[in-house]
Image (cartoon, rainbow, N blue to C red):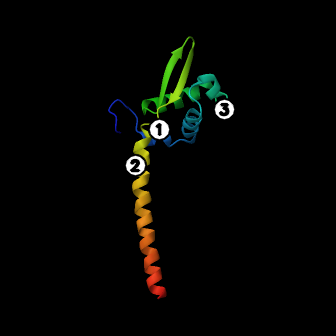
Amino acid sequence: MSDINHTRDVYDAIADPTRRRLIRMLAEAKELPLHELTAQFDMGRTAVSKHLTILKEAGLINSRKVGRETLFSLNAAPLREVQDWISFYSQFWSMNLRRLGDLLEEEEE
């Protein structure tokens, strides 16, 4: 975890498909209230709230109260860690596949 304020690992937070879907929804909208998020799932408000709590603990979402409503928004900064990790392995595989291609070309000659 890159930020000591985060109490949950970003990889743990994005491991669940429901949480990935919540992240996607928040990425496509500026802010969404809990009732609009809940309407997109076949689960109750409490279950969606638990997923949002996990995302918040990982620093992936922000929330703010507006009257009686809580609005949620995406904080994509922690996803940089995931992007960097994937980028490293993408380069690793590209390099190795290039080597394999070179070897196969050498054998054909």
Pointer 2 local density, CA inside 10 Å: few below 14, some 14–19, many at least 20: few
Pointer 1 local density, CA inside 10 Å: few below 14, some 14–19, many at least 20: many
- The residue pinned by badge 1 equals 13
- Single out the mark in the foreground, 2 or 3: 2
The amino acid on which the numbered mark 3 sits, given as a three-letter code, is: Gln
Picture disc at residue 40? 3
The vertical placement of 26 against 70, above or below, is below
> How far apart, in angstroms, are the residues tagged by discs 1 and 3?
19 Å
Left or right: 6, with 16 as reference point: left
Q: Quadrant of residue 33?
A: top right
- The residue pinned by badge 2 equals 84
Q: Earlier in the sequence, mark 1 or mark 3?
A: 1
Tag 2, which secondary structure?
helix
Counting from the top left corner in percent of width and height, residue 39 is at: 67, 28
The amino acid on which the numbered mark 1 sits, given as a three-letter code, is: Ala
Q: Quadrant of the N terminus?
A: top left
Residue lying at the far bottom of the rendered structure:
109
**What residue sits 56% from the left and 32% below the top?**
26
Counting from the top left corner in percent of width and height, residue 25 is at: 59, 34
The reply to whether dot 2 and dot 1 touch (C-beta < 8 Å) is no
Tag 1, which secondary structure?
helix
Q: Quadrant of residue 77?
A: top left
Left or right: 40, with 31 as reference point: right
The amino acid on which the numbered mark 2 sits, given as a three-letter code, is: Asp
Pointer 3 local density, CA inside 10 Å: few below 14, some 14–19, many at least 20: few
Q: Earlier in the sequence, mark 2 or mark 3?
A: 3
**What residue sits 50% from the left and 19% below the top?**
64
